Each structure stands twice: as structure tokens, then as C-alpha cells.
Image: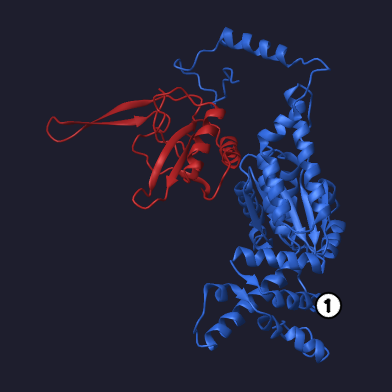
Amino acid sequence: MKITQGTFSFLPELTDEQVKAQIEYALDQGWAINVEYTDDPHPRNTYWEMWGLPMFDLRDPVGVMEEVQACRDAHPNHYIRVGAFDSTRGWETVRLSFIVNRPEHEPGFRLVRQEAQGRNIRYTIESYAVAGRPEGERYGD
Amino acid sequence: METERRYSFGGRTDGDSRPEEPAPEAADEQTQEEAARVVPDDAPVDIEGAFRDSNVQEVLDKLDRELVGLKPIKTRIKETAALLLVDRVRTDVGLPAAVPSLHMSFTGNPGTGKTTVALRMAEILHRLEYIRKGHLVSVTRDQLVGQYIGHTAPKTKEILKKAMGGVLFIDEAYYLHRAENERDYGSEAIETLLQVMENQRDDIVVILAGYKDRMDQFFQNNPGMHSRIAHHMDFPDYTAEELLEISGLMLEEQQYRFSQEAEKTFREYIELRIKRPNFSNARSMRNALDRARLRQANRLFAGGGKGLTKKDLMTIESEDIRASRVFQEAVGDGEGEGTDER
């Protein structure tokens, strides 16, 4: 099951050229780029680990691509996303965010039922990849 | 032309990926383009057109106009521009053009225009599409060298990332290497720099600047750095005549002018100033003019401000310059040597 999120979630995976072009666009807008990674695919997992510090005052996407590649090398089986932060007053938020790396195999989610008081059933989802395993051991790397 | 290039996206195996087979038209186009690239040897080459398109002349003219003197530097810049242009035309007709190494070192006394030339250089290289963005990131030792073990490399890399696509200007680069302390982190910064200078020549141009003797020393201690820098430019000191011209430009910029008398006095001032210690070429001129403006303002104010015209506000008189300590000390045989000239 392919996890999607962010700006281009409905498109096929971006090629490196396309990622570079998007980063160039973000830099031209004056946004700061940061690279984040995680191995917890839960949709409510909002705060990912940061790969280095956010990159302010860059002009050219080459520097960001280097960081992306370094993060891929270090975490080949993690989700990695690139975020572009707009510091303009009134915005002060992430304007663009997309996934640039994902695990080779994404097993998806299972439905968990919990029997509650009376005959109530509570439903939740749990990732097969996580399934009780600690961070860093979830996608077999 | 962008053909379908599948990129290893962590090797995903999902069914909904993009089509595998390359589009047949795309392949055709490629061979056609390759065929068009085989240009006969006697084909005319439009080097002037390329020159015009790049708008380099405009920057070169600006360089000529705004920078007085510096003959050897200007010649060198023109040569570099010519090389890049020829390379570009060569690629156009399908000849191989190796990416030249354009890292430079600017040596010269203070105030000889190293930073200004670096700025222009960034612009020229950008017009010639050698670098993509054309910005200049100016740093000194503090911004490259860290304070504890393991701090330097990331710090240097961060600066390098900022300078990607542009020019990294390292002022007083000799401070990077401290010969007396072999545990200094400066050498780590140099190593990181060297690596990028070698491997990412098309992403970044590094310009090292500093005083001649200390830079020579620096290169002697870092032969790796010396050999990776193809262009060593030495900025000559300005002559008195050139300094006068520079001062004229500076005044013009600020909408001031010398009275006829003042110009003569200023010429005298320059002659005397050159001989004094701590002389730093154009920078000394700027300081001298700033002080002259101060005295002019004082004079206008003391005069009670009656009957002043716009012309008075713009004119620097001889007495504004004559009040300088340089004149007094020329008579009094160099009293207070070494202190800042007033």
C-alpha cells in the first residue's frame, strides 16, 4: 500500500530532476528547505525527524539535493520528505511538502478492533511495518 | 531534452508506477538531434552573435567605467570571458569543451578593489552561464571554521551550500591556515573546501583574497590549494592619477564635486597620503572624502547658513581638504606617525 501525503500525493513519484525543479521553485520564492525522515507511516505522525538543520539563505538546489541524497544513503528504507517553509508574516508555515523517498516494501495497515464496554467495538489502524517494533527496525534496514 | 528517466525511488515495486517503455518518438528525436550535431568543419561560427546574446559587453563596459586602472586584471577578465564564450560556441557545434577550473586568488594591498572585482566576476560568469545564479557569498575565517571538534566540516558545508550556483569569496583566506598551531580546525575547513572545489567545479567558483605576501605564504603551506587555483591575479596599487579619478567617481556617486582649487589641493593630499603608513588605496580615499564632507558640513553650519545655494551644498572647497592632518604633519615632519590620519 503506497502511502501518499503532501503536495504531489496524487502524482507518480517525482524524478530527481523534478524534485530539483520543485526545490528551485521553493528557493526562488524565498522559502527555507528542510529534509525530514521517519519510519512510522501512520497518517497522524506529523512530526518527523529532521535531517540536519533547515537550510536558510540558499540560492541553488544543488546543496539541497546533496542533503536529500545523504539522507537517502543513511536511511534508504525510510520515508523522506522535503518541506519548504515560508517565513513571510501572515504565512509562517510550510508551503510545500512532498515525499522523495519511501521504503521498498510498504505492507500497509491492519484494522484493530477493541471490545469496549457493552457490546461496543472501537476501531483503529496499525501499521504492519511498525507492529510493535521500535524505530529503525521497521522496514528491515 | 528530457527522456523518460526512471529514478531509483528506494526501488518501489508498486503497480501504479510510470510506464517502463521509453516513448518511441523520444528516441527518434534524440538520434535526429545527434545527427544535427555533426557540423562540417568549415561551417561558419557565429561567435559575435553568442557574444551579443550573453550581454557580457555590458558588464565589461561597466567594469571599465567603474573601475579605474587595474589593467592586468581587466585583461585577465576579458580573456576568461573569451575562453568561456569560445567554449560555449564549441559545445554548440558539437566539439567537446572541458569545464575549465575557474577558482581564483586575488592578491593585493588593501583597497585595491578585490571585493568589487569579485562581485563583477560573479556577474560575468553568470552572464556566460558558467554559474547558474550569479550571487556572491562573502565569508571570512569565522564563518568557515568551527569552535570544537566536529563543528568545522558542517559549518563549512553550510556556507558552501549557500554559495552553490554562485561565487564563494573568502576574504583574508590566509587566516584559514595557522602554521603555528597544527591542531587548528582551519585545515579541516581547507580540506572540505578542496573537495568541493575539485568535484563540483560547475556548481561553485571559489575566490580567495588577501594580501600578497601572506597569501604566498598560505599557498606555500597548502600546495593542494595552490594547484587547484588556476587564476592567480595580483592587484597593483593605484597611481596618484588613478586615485584622483577614483575620488572623482566616489564624489559623483554622492552628488558632490570639488571646486577647482579643491581638486588641486586633493591632488597634493594624495601625493602626501601615499607616503604615509597605513595607506590603503581607494579605501583611504573614501575615508578622506568622508572627512572632507564632515568639514564641509561644519563650515556651512559655522557660516550661519545665510545665502547658501544648492551649489554650496554640493561643493567641497580647498579648505575642507587643507585642514587635514596629513598637510600639517608634512610640514611638522611626521608627528604622531602610525596613528590614523585626521
For residue B20, above or below residue B160: above
Dot 1 alpha-carbon crowd within 10 angstroms: few under 14, some 14 to 19, many 20 or more? few
Q: In which quarter of the image is the C terminus of chain A?
A: top right
Visible in this render: residue B100? no
What colour scheme governs how the chains and residues are painted in the rendered image of this protein? by chain
Number of marks in the rendered image: 1
Image location (x, y in percent) of residue B276: 81, 79
Which chain comes out red in the rendered image?
A
Visible in this render: residue B145? yes
For residue B89, above or below residue B198: above
Q: Quadrant of the N terminus of chain A?
A: top left
For residue B57, above or below residue B331: above
Apparent colour of chain B:
blue
Please tell me in which quadrant of the rendered image residue B239 appears.
bottom right
Of residues B39 and A85, the one nearer the viewer is B39
Task: Report the chain holding disc 1.
Answer: B
Q: Which residue is drawn at 85% across and 58% down?
A: B221
What residue would you read off at disc 1?
Answer: B275
Image location (x, y in percent) of residue B330: 81, 86
**Outermost residue toward the front?**
B307
**Outermost residue toward the left?**
A118
Q: Which residue is drawn at 46% across and 18% down?
A: B14
Q: Which amino acid does label 1 sit on?
A: Lys
Q: Residue at x 80, y 52 (%)?
A: B73
B67 lies left or right of B158: right
> Quick one: SS at disc 1?
helix
Image location (x, y in percent) of residue B332: 81, 92
Image location (x, y in percent) of residue B138: 65, 56
Of residues B184 and B220, the one nearer the viewer is B220
Of residues A23 and A97, the one nearer the viewer is A23
Q: Which residue is drawn at 72% across and 49% down?
A: B206
